[in-house]
Image (cartoon, helix red, strand yellow):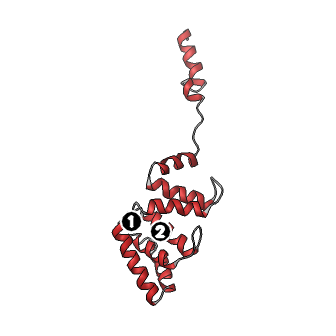
Amino acid sequence: MLNTHSVWMVIVLLLGGCFPYVSQPSMTEFERTSKRAKAGSAVAQNKLGVIYADGTLTPQDHTEATKWYRAAAEQGFAPAQYNLGMAYASGLGVTEDMVEAFAWLSVAAGGVGQTDLQRVEACLSGNGLSLARQKAKDYLEKYGSGT
C-alpha cells in the first residue's frame, strides 16, 4: 500500500523530476555549439563552420563558415585547416585563392586531404607554387601542424 509520501514522489517524477529544470528550455545543438565556439573551443569552432556551410541548423552562410574555420585553423585544428583550404580552393565564403588553399591544405597534417592538396598544387606553377610553399611553411611555424 502506498503512503502519501510515495504518491507525491510518483507525481513529481511523472511531472519531470525537479520543477526548476522543467521550466528551463533546452539549448539547441546550434546554440550549444555556438556558445562553445565563442568560448574558444577549436572543435566547436570547426563544427559551427560546418553548420553554417551546410545550412541544416541555420541559414547557409559560407562567409560565416570560413570565419569559424579560420578561428579553429589558427589554433592548429587539422580538420578546420583542411576546411579552410577547401574554402579557398572553391571560393566559397572567400575569394578563390590557390596559394592560400595550398598553404592551409599543406598545414593540415596526417594525410588529411592529400588528393585535394595535389589538385590545388596542379593549379599552381612557378612563382605561385614557390609562394604557396613559403606560405605553408610560415603557417606551419605560426599555427603548428594540424592535430
Residue found at x 57% / y 14%: 7
Residue found at x 53% / y 11%: 5
Q: Is residue 32 above or below residue 9?
A: below
Q: Secondary structure at mark 2?
A: helix
Q: Which residue is mark 2?
A: 82
Q: Position of residue 25 (x, y in %)?
A: 60, 35
Q: Which residue is mark 1?
A: 146
The residue type indicated by label 1 comes to Gly
Q: Earlier in the sequence, mark 1 or mark 2?
A: 2
Q: Is residue 86 above or below residue 41?
A: below
Question: In the displayed image of the protein, which residue is found farthest to the left?
Answer: 141
The residue type indicated by label 2 comes to Tyr
Where is residue 3, by image quadrant?
top right
Instruction: Give left or right: position of 8 versus 117.
Output: right
Q: Secondary structure at mark 1?
A: loop
Q: CA gap, disc 1 to disc 2?
A: 9 Å
Q: Nearer the viewer, residue 33 or 2?
A: 33
Q: Nearer the viewer, residue 147 or 129?
A: 129
Residue found at x 57% / y 69%: 94
Question: Label 1: few (<14), some or many (≥20) within 10 Å?
Answer: many
Residue found at x 44% / y 85%: 129
- Quadrant (top left/top right/bottom left/bottom right) for the N terminus: top right
Instruction: Give left or right: position of 72 versus 96.
Output: left
Question: Label 2: few (<14), some or many (≥20) within 10 Å?
Answer: many
